[in-house]
Image (spheres, grey):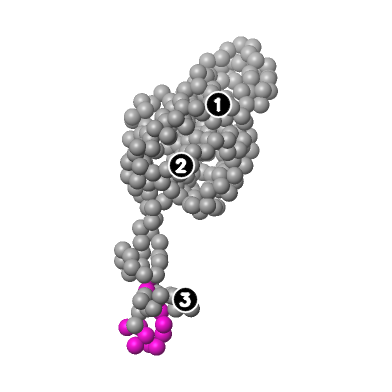
């Protein structure tokens, strides 16, 4: 894995890309004297260069990630650790950020595969807490990280204000989002029947409902539409998207991330 982008800069580089008008202070070595002799214009030669990008792993640690037995958060941390190791082994700049209703924890940028133990320690200490507000969390993230790059969002995307806000904040601020959507099979097909008390693990709200076969059928339909809407949103905006169901073997999921494209640059 290598996170790179090609930028146009004056001076030497990978290959010639374009010209721009000379500006006071430009290095005379990079003037195109052939153009000057032919047309009398002072133009600076621009070249394309490969520039390392930072890779940010944004891990959702809100309380909904502890749904069931907490497998979603454990899975998210394993995904972040595996992908971070690949980045570090290739000398990419890797940072880990934990979020809930805001940025809650940060591991500063690091490089080199020997630093993977720092990543492990950071991720091991994360606990599910707080409510979800991806929009506000991503605004804080953008303000804290001036260096643009690949932003791998690992989350269940449960956000009362809408999952779209957080992804759009990244897009509008020139980050390249890559969404790893963590889900649990029991969320799609809850094993409930009769009179039950539903509890919102983030807000603490409670509601008594009577669960019938018709109610479950309707729920499964709405949940399926919700998943489809997330995929559609990402697809139409060319945001790489992977659904990471915790029942999928971990190594299979990681391979799927690489095959998806967008993470490999």
Residue 117 in picture, x, y percent from top left: 39, 32
Tell me the residue at 36%/25% (across/down): 249
- Inspect this view and state whether residue 62 appears: yes
Numbered disc in front, either 2 or 1: 2
Q: Which residue in the structure is indicated by mark 3?
A: 25
Query: In the rendered structure, are the residues bearing label 2 and label 1 in contact, judged by CB atoms less than 8 Å apart?
Result: no
Residue 167 in picture, x, y percent from top left: 54, 44
Residue 8's place in the image compared with 149, above or below, is: below
Q: Nearer the viewer, residue 7 or 191?
A: 7
The magenta segment: 34-46
Numbered disc in front, either 3 or 1: 3
- The answer to which image quadrant residue 90 occupies is top left
Q: Which residue in the structure is indicated by mark 1?
A: 128
CA distance for labels 3 and 2 = 36 Å
Residue 36 within the magenta-colored segment of the rendering:
yes
Tell me the residue at 54%/35% (across/down): 105
Residue 127 in picture, x, y percent from top left: 53, 26
Residue 154 in picture, x, y percent from top left: 48, 36
Q: Secondary structure at mark 3?
A: loop
Tell me the residue at 43%/48% (across/down): 54
Q: Nearer the viewer, residue 90 or 240?
A: 90
Q: Which residue in the structure is indicated by mark 2?
A: 95
CA distance for labels 2 and 1 = 19 Å
Q: Is residue 102 left or right of residue 16?
A: right
Q: Earlier in the sequence, mark 2 or mark 1?
A: 2
């Amino acid at each position: 894995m290598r996170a790179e982008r090609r930028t146009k800069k004056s001076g030497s580089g990978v290959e010639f890309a374009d010209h721009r008008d000379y500006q006071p202070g430009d290095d005379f070595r990079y003037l195109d004297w052939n153009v000057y002799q032919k047309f009398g214009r002072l133009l600076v030669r621009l070249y394309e260069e490969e520039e390392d990008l930072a890779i940010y792993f944004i891990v959702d640690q809100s309380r909904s990630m502890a749904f069931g037995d907490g497998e979603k958060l454990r899975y998210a941390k394993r995904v972040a650790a595996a992908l971070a190791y690949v980045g570090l082994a290739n000398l990419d700049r890797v940072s880990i950020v934990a979020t809930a209703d805001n940025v809650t924890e940060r591991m500063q940028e690091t490089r080199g595969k020997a630093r993977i133990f720092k990543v492990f320690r950071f991720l091991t200490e994360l606990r599910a807490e707080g409510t979800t507000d991806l929009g506000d969390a991503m605004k804080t993230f953008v303000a804290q990280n001036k260096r643009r790059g690949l932003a791998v969002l690992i989350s269940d995307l449960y956000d009362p204000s809408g999952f779209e806000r957080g992804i759009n904040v990244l897009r509008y601020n020139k980050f390249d989002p890559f969404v790893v959507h963590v889900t649990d099979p029991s969320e799609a097909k809850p094993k409930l029947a009769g009179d039950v008390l539903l509890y919102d693990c983030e807000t603490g709200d409670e509601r008594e409902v009577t669960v019938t076969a018709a109610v479950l059928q309707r729920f499964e339909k709405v949940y399926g539409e919700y998943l489809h809407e997330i995929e559609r949103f990402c697809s139409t905006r060319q945001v790489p998207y992977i659904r990471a169901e915790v029942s999928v073997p971990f190594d299979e999921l990681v391979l799927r991330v690489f095959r998806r494209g967008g993470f490999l640059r």
